Image: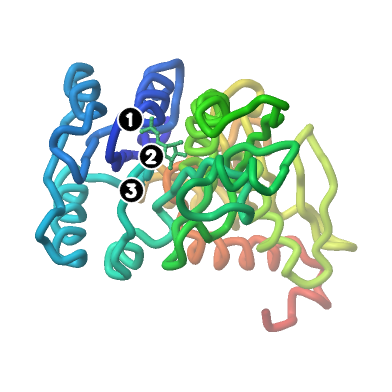
């Protein structure tokens, strides 16, 4: 099991989304944990809730402070807590460019509309004024532009005839509490999910000359046309619990040497003619540059002579 993502949540008020993230993090094998809840208002009720659950909290009023200076303090607190990802959950502050740059690609926000519709404040009134028949909420990656950035997930709710901004807000929040934990979990595992790892392996393998893909032994396999298989992607093969790339190597010695070098990464695959193959575990931050080079070497071992001579 890879290490859990360490999430810092920023709030300004009630913190019901933070609570949804926190309680979800304690269910089953959630891939993230909440390590810090911070607020720009020391009285924010969400801080009490978090502290009551044993989570570290940080509350500091931004009043009278320059935006960049305040944000620098928040970043320092997040870093001190070893935060890997930031979740904005009702954080009613514009962020400084420095903050956004520091957490680029690792900071998510929730907004109570179906973005790109109705950015900014007074969202539910705007939805009613526009005569929308549905609304909802959106999780997106934070970019310098307010309520902008790539959308990761949305949940939709119907607008009912007698809705007011308050009734809409309540129902949108029900949806938010379902959506945020799921999207955050998907986001923090985006690079370790088997499908994502297979996509990466496939991209590298099929970039090699005359490489093709075919299922073999129940796993996606990659071979050289007119030659042999040089790589397999295995996920929980025969229930071994491992997501791995199996690569052809020159023989037992090379495999043994790699395993001796780093037996947390390399292993002897059980069902693939162990003498000529080495397994590389993919879930703990694979070294893709090394894999690319090893894959080219594997390709060369398996290519027909006329192709193996090609420079790649
Ligand atoms: C949520 O509706 C969120 O979409 C918006 O602010 C609200 C925060 O509520 N950005 P809470 O503090 O999570 O209860």
Q: Tag on residue 15?
A: 1
In the picture shown, does residue 180 fall above or below 131? above
- The percent position of residue 6, horizontal first and vertical second, equals 31, 39
N-term-proximal mark, 2 vs 1: 1
Q: Secondary structure at mark 2?
A: loop
Assign ligand 1 to one image quadrant.
top left
- In the rendered image, residue 30, in percent from the top left (x then y), is placed at 44, 25
Q: Residue at x 84, y 60 (%)?
A: 227
Disc 2 + disc 1, Cβ < 8 Å: yes
Q: Is residue 268 left or right of residue 1?
A: right
Q: CA distance from mark 2 to mark 3?
A: 9 Å
> How far apart, in angstroms, are the residues tagged by discs 2 and 1?
7 Å
Where is the N terminus found, in terms of image quarters?
A: top left
Residue at label 3?
92
Mark number displayed over residue 89: 2
Q: Is mark 1 within 8 Å of ligand 1?
A: yes
Q: Please state the total of marks drawn on the protein image.
A: 3
Disc nearest the viewer among 3 and 1? 3
On the question of residue 245 being in view, the answer is: no
């Amino acid at each position: 099991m890879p290490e859990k993502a360490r999430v810092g949540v920023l709030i300004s008020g009630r913190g019901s989304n933070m609570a949804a993230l926190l309680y979800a993090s304690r269910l089953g094998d959630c891939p993230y944990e909440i390590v810090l809840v911070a607020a720009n208002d020391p009285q924010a009720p969400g801080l009490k809730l978090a502290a009551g659950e044993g989570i570290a909290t940080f509350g500091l009023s931004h009043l009278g402070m320059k935006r960049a200076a305040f944000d620098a303090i928040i970043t320092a607190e997040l870093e001190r807590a070893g935060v890997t990802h930031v979740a904005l959950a009702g954080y009613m502050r514009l962020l400084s460019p420095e903050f956004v740059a520091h957490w680029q690609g690792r900071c998510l926000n929730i907004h109570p509309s179906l973005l790109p519709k109705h950015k900014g404040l007074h969202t539910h009134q705007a939805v009613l004024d526009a005569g929308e028949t549905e609304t909802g909420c959106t999780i997106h990656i934070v970019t310098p532009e307010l309520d902008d950035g790539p959308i990761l997930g949305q949940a939709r709710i119907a607008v009912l005839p007698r809705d007011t901004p308050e009734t809409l807000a309540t129902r949108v929040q029900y949806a938010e509490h379902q959506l945020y934990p799921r999207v955050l979990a998907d986001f923090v595992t985006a690079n370790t999910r088997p499908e994502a790892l297979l996509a990466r392996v496939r991209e590298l393998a099929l970039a090699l000359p005359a490489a093709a893909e075919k299922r073999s032994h129940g796993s996606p396999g990659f071979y050289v046309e007119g030659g042999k298989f040089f790589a397999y992607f295995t996920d929980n093969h025969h229930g071994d619990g491992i997501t791995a790339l199996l690569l052809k190597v020159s023989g037992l010695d090379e495999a043994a040497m790699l395993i001796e070098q780093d037996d947390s990464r390399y292993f002897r695959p059980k069902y693939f003619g162990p003498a000529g193959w080495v397994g590389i575990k993919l879930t703990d931050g694979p070294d893709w540059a090394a894999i690319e080079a090893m894959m080219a070497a594997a390709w060369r071992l398996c290519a027909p002579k006329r192709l193996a001579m090609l420079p790649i």
